[in-house]
Image (cartoon, rainbow, N blue to C red):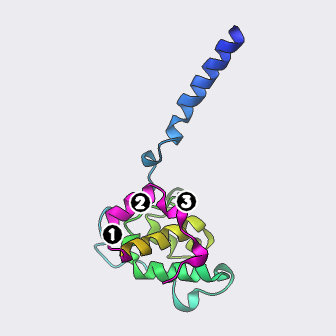
Amino acid sequence: MKKILGCAALVALTLAASAQFTNPGADIPAYHVGAPKQALPALMSGAQLTGLFFSHPYQVTAYKMAAKVSSVLYQQPCYCHCDRAMGHTSLHSCFEGTHGAECSTCMKEGVYTYQQTKLGRSPAQIRAGIERGEWMNIDLEHATI
């Protein structure tokens, strides 16, 4: 009987401790609520989209899409949590350097942001979709501008 109670207590403690990880809305990465008030840092483009970090066509496509919705990216979180590891302030930061080409989360969120913007969704609506994980369904291999 003691073993059963001990196991039950352990399970209850484990569930209580892991509850913080089961609410995706409680851990939203950094983003900006509104449009930028000043010029944003440049995103990588043109001849910069070649070489080791751009060996797949979808990497280049993701950056080209990002360039078309730069101010919307500024208003989106990035769920690879590069805000913690790299000090990024939004999804825009990912495409200022090569990080976006190395990370499928960044690329998928960037393509999702582009596609949703083209459908007429507001940055807040796009952010809600990103928070729900809708970007996870993006097929990078078939993304086209």
Residue at 49%, 59% in the rendered image? 83
| Marked residue nearer the N-terminal end (2 or 1) | 1
Give the alpha-carbon distance from disc 2 to disc 1, as whole Å: 10 Å
Q: Give the SS element for disc 1.
A: loop
Quadrant of residue 14 within the rendered picture: top right
| Residue at numbered disc 3 | 80
Q: Is residue 48 above or below residue 119?
A: below
Residue at 62%, 71% in the rendered image? 102
| Residue at numbered disc 1 | 121
| Residue at numbered disc 2 | 129
The stretch in magenta equals 118-145
**Does residue 113 show up magenta in the picture?**
no
Image quarter of the N terminus: top right
- Answer whether labels 2 and 1 touch (C-beta < 8 Å): yes
| Marked residue nearer the N-terminal end (2 or 3) | 3
Q: Residues within 10 Å of mark 3 (few under 14, many from 20)?
A: some
**Does residue 142 show up magenta in the picture?**
yes
* Amino acid at pointer 3: Cys
Residue at 58%, 78% in the rendered image? 142
Q: Is residue 54 above or below residue 79?
A: below
Report x, y in % for residue 11. 62, 25
Q: Residues within 10 Å of mark 1 (few under 14, many from 20)?
A: some
Farthest residue, direction right: 3
